[in-house]
Amino acid sequence: MTRTSRQCFPSSLRLLAPAIIIALAPACASDDEPTAEATDVAVSGSIAEAADETTSTTTVNRQERTDLRGARYCELMLVSEGEAGFEGVVYTTQGLNECPQDQWEALDLASIAKERGALFAVPNGPRHLTLDSVSIVLADDPARMTFGEIEMTEVALVNIGDELTAWPTYSERSVVRDTVFSFNRGSEIYELVNPDGARYVMQSRSQIVDPSLNEAGLAGLGDRLKLPEGWSFEVRTLEQDLDVLDTDGLATVVQDELLNTYQRIDAP
């Protein structure tokens, strides 16, 4: 994707058996937080069609979603083995429901995987957005499924590769999506900085490892995280709007050990 606007710069799934972490997209709101109707890359029918749809001059449906900071969401990834290796089809609650905690905890992952013909189903959530708005490309009729009592929309395809191995923390992974994550002037943001000076801004906080982690606790993460040598954690208040873009349809993401997800800030 190519875009210039304002200051232009470019959600996480844990596979329980075996382990792997995938960072993905923003989603829906909690009972006391704003509702987010945005999706990442939604497709009609097969998620594999997303790349063609996002580059089409006739089928692109770009939408803007605002007031997303703090919005709660959950995702589920169905992992299978394809011709090019393992892949995961991702579904999200965003725009459909608030991912009720009791229904989320009641999901029978083994049964879901068997019913859908997947190797296994991977839960991701609950999570909360730490961005303010999203510009996203949608299909006209994104596929929907109901898992347990939770309705979800198909939003992304993750190419895992030939092996199901753990994704180390503070290690980059690419995600196919056409999005612009925006942070408003005056917003507090949380960034990781690697030894080469590359910056990764937090797009969502996780309550998977630490269910008590709230937004008020983010500023103090620098004292909690076990950062690799040469890495740092920074908190700053934006003096101007910040847009975080994918680069040619790929977003580069990392996670910390609490499974908070950050996207690399690339040059436009």
Image: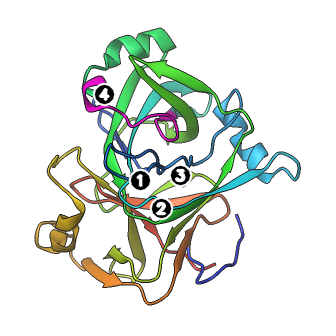
Question: Which residue is the site of mark 2?
Answer: 67
Nearest to N terminus: mark 4 or mark 1: 1
Query: Which element is circle 3 on?
Result: strand
What amino acid does circle 1 point to?
Pro
The residues bearing labels 3 and 2 have C-alpha atoms spaced at a distance of 24 Å
Query: Viewer-nearest of labels 4 and 3?
Result: 4
Question: Which residue is the site of mark 3?
Answer: 175
The residues bearing labels 4 and 1 have C-alpha atoms spaced at a distance of 19 Å
Query: Which element is circle 2 on?
Result: loop
Question: Which residue is the site of mark 4?
Answer: 104
- Residue at x 49% of width, y 41% of height: 94
What amino acid does circle 4 point to?
Trp
The magenta span reads 90-103
- Residue at x 42% of width, y 16% of height: 113
The residues bearing labels 4 and 3 have C-alpha atoms spaced at a distance of 25 Å
Nearest to N terminus: mark 2 or mark 1: 1
- Can you say whether 65 is above or below 90 in the image? below
Question: Looking at the image, do the residues carrying marks 2 and 1 touch, with CB atoms under 8 Å apart?
Answer: yes
Nearest to N terminus: mark 4 or mark 3: 4
Nearest to N terminus: mark 3 or mark 1: 1
- Can you say whether 23 is above or below 185 in the image? above
* Occupied quadrant, residue 200: bottom left
What amino acid does circle 3 point to?
Val
The residues bearing labels 2 and 1 have C-alpha atoms spaced at a distance of 7 Å
Residue 46 colored in magenta in the image: no
Is residue 169 visible to us here? yes
- Residue at x 75% of width, y 38% of height: 140
